Image (tube, helix red, strand yellow):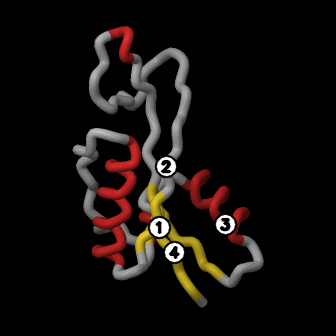
Amino acid sequence: MFEIVISSRNKEKKRELKALLKGLGIKVIDLNDFPGAPKVKETGKTFEANAKLKALKIAKYTKRPAVADDSGLVVNALGESRVSAPRGSRGITLPTKIITVNC
């Protein structure tokens, strides 16, 4: 069976991807299956760049194709000029998901 790794430990992401790929013969695994997986620094200037960083690092570590996403809110009117989504922040969250697959 073909395996794909989600570059996250978020069980909801795993559940969503499993539902999307149901019946295709693809086993979805996540970083909970790789306790020693490295934490990836999100140093990209865009959400897509951060997703690619995560997917590439995890694909290399697990030696399997990987998917990743990154999302957040950028408010230029407030002087925000970089990708930023502080964990645990309060207020409105408008996610923009980018998924990257690397084989």
Of the numbered discs 4 and 1, the one sitting upstream in the chain is 4
> Which of labels 2 and 4 is toward the front?
2
Spatial separation of the CA atoms under disc 3 and disc 4: 10 Å
Q: Callout 3 environment at 10 Å: few (<14), some (14 to 19), or many (20+)?
A: some
| Residue 64 percent location from the top left of the image | 41, 80
Q: Callout 4 environment at 10 Å: few (<14), some (14 to 19), or many (20+)?
A: many
Q: Quadrant of the N terminus?
A: bottom right
| Residue 102 percent location from the top left of the image | 41, 71
Q: Residue 101 has which mark?
A: 1
Mark 1 element type: strand
Farthest residue to the bottom: give it.
1
Q: Quadrant of residue 52?
A: bottom left
Q: Which residue carries the number 3 mark?
A: 18
Q: Residue 98 has which mark?
A: 2
Q: Which residue carries the number 4 mark?
A: 4
Contact, mark 4 vs mark 1 (Cβ under 8 Å): yes
Spatial separation of the CA atoms under disc 4 and disc 1: 9 Å
Q: Name the amino acid type tagged 1.
A: Val
Quick check: 48 left or right of 24? left
In the rendered view, would you say 64 is above or below 44? below
